[in-house]
Amino acid sequence: MPLVAAQSTADIAHNDLRDYVWTMNFGPQHPATHTTLRLVLKLDGERVLDAMPDIGYLHSGFEKIGEHLDYNQYVTVTDRMNYISPMANNVAWHMAVEKLLGIELTPRAVYIRTIICELARISDHLLSTGAIGLDVGAFTFFLYAFYQREKIYDIFETLCGARFTNSYTRVGGSSHDITPLVVEKIRAFCQDFPKTIDDMERLLNRNRIFVDRTKGVGLLSREDAVNFSATGPVARASGVTRDLRKDEPYLAYADLDFNVPCMKTGDCYARYLVRMVEMRESLKLVQQAIENIPSGPFNVGIDERTALPSKQQVYQTIEGTISHFELVMANRGFEVPQEEVYCATEAPNGELGFYVVGDGSDVAYRARCRPPSFINFAMFPHLIRGHTLSDIVAVLGSLNIIAAELDR
Amino acid sequence: MSVPAPPDLNERFPCVTCSEFRGDTRLVVPRDDLVALFKFLRDEHHFDLLVDLTCVDYLKYRGAENRFGLIYIVGDSRSAARLTVRTFVNEPDTVVPSVTSLWRGANWLEREVWDLFGITFDGHPDHRRILLPEEFTAHPLRKDYPLQGLGERHNFPTITRGEA
């Protein structure tokens, strides 16, 4: 398959004429890519002249599947997009669907969703900062991070029964209510976590090898970040202050107190630091939200015919039976307008939006996902040009590319 | 959050129509004005971020007049202001001017739309498939392409170790 440079400069064309420029294949199976992605590198000795990403190895047609599964079923597919923070994807998908359907959530559901979104952010950042440490040689750091990630898995397991692919949200609410046991586990986590994050910062923030490997590597200026459509921690490390949680407060973010960490340097080290500080801010959000969960129902009421009724209601009341039957039968469920909406959330990796087109049936006509990994990875050749071969793993780690979301 | 359309929009672009649904402002623009409109939005109203670029195939959509709708979502990098811009194209002339000259981030997004919908972007620097292999002939997110595929998966050439 012929591969051509995405944006070849005159300099590279000139270099092509020299006989010591050679081409190297990186991936698709490589420990530092973590998943399946391939780079074709043009090297001058150890210096990368150009990189040509070749993606699509994990393309599974998620958007096509979205046109054949109904609004509640598709949540299982969103789990598999960014599988290191599935809860954030679940919430993003159902927020878009609820915007299309015009459903207003109960205050309790809003708080539950805020808590799980922030726990998902912590678990994502633990993995992404852990992985960048692992790739540049700091193995202990990764183990500290993963130990805490296990605890978040435990919380999710207690909440909904699944550790990894949660599929937690439903149209108009969620599959399970938050129980006192979950609250207790989250409180224990909140108490335990600051100590670990202190340890993690002490391990790496001033570690000479780590700083030398990441500082000044993969520079992204503010102008380039905006021009390349970067969002999330990658953009915030380059001086873009945009954070949808602050600028467009959805869920319960308007009620809670938190800061948005930003840096101006725009290198791998800045992206790492932004993620570390974001974890502390997320923890603050979880601590505030967990103490203020409103009482009341966690799903939209049964008479609105949007949320699936609980099993108890289905088996013991006639309204529950009818409501369940209508929602599960094809073309009897929701009243879907023939309209289109775009709804975005601030996922751990950046702006995760869904463009949903409704056609009146209970299946989306089009379920487009704006994948932050795909858009962040597009600037990889720009970031790596001029650096050495060993910097590739640092840049890949700092962008936090999840190939399942990249290829969908 | 979506913001109202700029007040001087209709003065500059009389053919642009504007609608609203659940707080989203949507502009519909003829294909020929697309790049000029984006330049206007970016340089004069600070919509400097191309949030998303995608396409919808309206083949089986009730009441649709056009086959393909291209959807551009532009935003402001300093706030959450957002506008949806749509343009429509029909077969056989499925060519749209590329916006890569305004946003380099549009490069992969346009390649993805070409790959999955078969929309050609005029002026794109690297017009190749991105997710599917080069040998693929169909555009699978079109509505006339079946969910199960057309058997491409079973007909890929197999390379044995000896030949490789």
Image (cartoon, coloured by chain):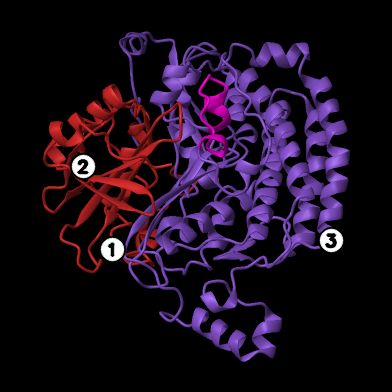
Q: Nearer the viewer, residue B50 or A44?
A: B50
What residue does disc 3 label? A180
Name the quadrant containing residue B78. Answer: top left
The amino acid sitting under disc 1 is Lys
The subunit letter for the residue under badge 3 reads: A
- Same subunit, tags 3 and 1: no
Q: List the residue tagged with mark 2.
A: B120
Measured in 3D between alpha carbons, the distance from the residue under mark 2 to the one under mark 1, in whole angstroms, is 17 Å
Q: Is residue A405 left or right of residue A285?
A: left
Tint applied to chain B in the drawing = red
Residue A331: x %, y % from top left: 40, 79
Tell me the number on the disc at residue A23.
none
Chain ID for purple: A
Whole-percent x and y of residue B104? Answer: 34, 26
In the rendered image, which residue does mark 1 sit on? Answer: B143
Amino acid carrying mark 2 in the image: Thr
Q: Is residue A376 above or below residue A96?
A: above
Task: Specify the subunit that label 1 lies on.
Answer: B
